[in-house]
Image (tube, rainbow, N blue to C red):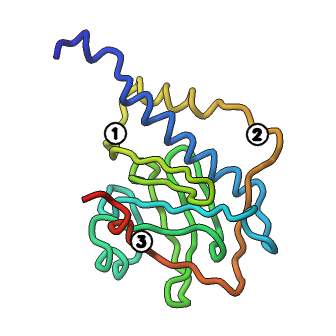
Amino acid sequence: MTDEDDYLRYDKMVETALRGVVRRAIEEVIENYNITNGMPGDHHFYITFLTDYPGVKIPDYLRERYPGEMTIVLQYQFSDLKVDNERLEVTLSFNNVPEKLVVPLNAISIFADPSVNFALQFQPLGEAMDDEDLILQELAEEEPDDPDGSGGGGRSSGEKTGEVISLDSFRKK
């Protein structure tokens, strides 16, 4: 491959734009958070991330239990959900103990909303992004707000409990 072939890295452009979709979906949940009804309809997010990725902050016992990769579900019991251009933060309950998780967006390997049969699978991006990647990420973030307000919210308490699942059973071997 020559230097000219590397000039337009469409693969990086697409990855950056699709990570912007994940960020925007989480922003819509935050904007439309409803503690009583949770997320609208049957919406819920499965977010798989690399536990050993730089910047991932999870309790040691979870890192030991899920070496390499972990999946969280955002549907009913979560709180303190935040997202910015670099990371997702959320508090989830594990065995009735609230734990704050910090996950860089670049550590996410799978994002899915099974209620609408939507899923994205990513190649992990390196921690350092070059100038072109940063510009593409900024462009992806300039999408207009959703005028119909079709996002959702979660609830921090309720009858249903959150769980960590493994997606290995869903993967083709």
Q: Secondary structure at mark 1?
A: loop
- Disc on res. 107: none
For disc 1, the marked residue is 128
x and y, in percent, of residue 26 in the image: 62, 53
x and y, in percent, of residue 166 in the image: 38, 71
Q: Nearer the viewer, residue 110 or 97?
A: 110
Q: Earlier in the sequence, mark 2 or mark 1?
A: 1
- Residue 20: image quadrant is top right
- Residue 169: image quadrant is bottom left
Above or below — where is 167 with respect to 61? above
Q: Secondary structure at mark 3?
A: loop
Q: What is the CA distance from the residue labelled 1 to the residue labelled 3?
A: 21 Å
For disc 3, the marked residue is 58
Q: Amino acid at mark 3?
A: Ile
Q: Amino acid at mark 2?
A: Asp
Q: Is residue 121 left or right of residue 143?
A: left
Quadrant of the frame with the N terminus = top left
For disc 2, the marked residue is 146
Q: Earlier in the sequence, mark 1 or mark 3?
A: 3
Above or below — where is 4 with respect to 136? above
Q: Nearer the viewer, residue 100 or 146?
A: 146
Decide: few, some or many residues near mark 1? Use Cα within 10 Å; few <14, some 14-19, many ≥20: few
x and y, in percent, of residue 84 in the image: 58, 48
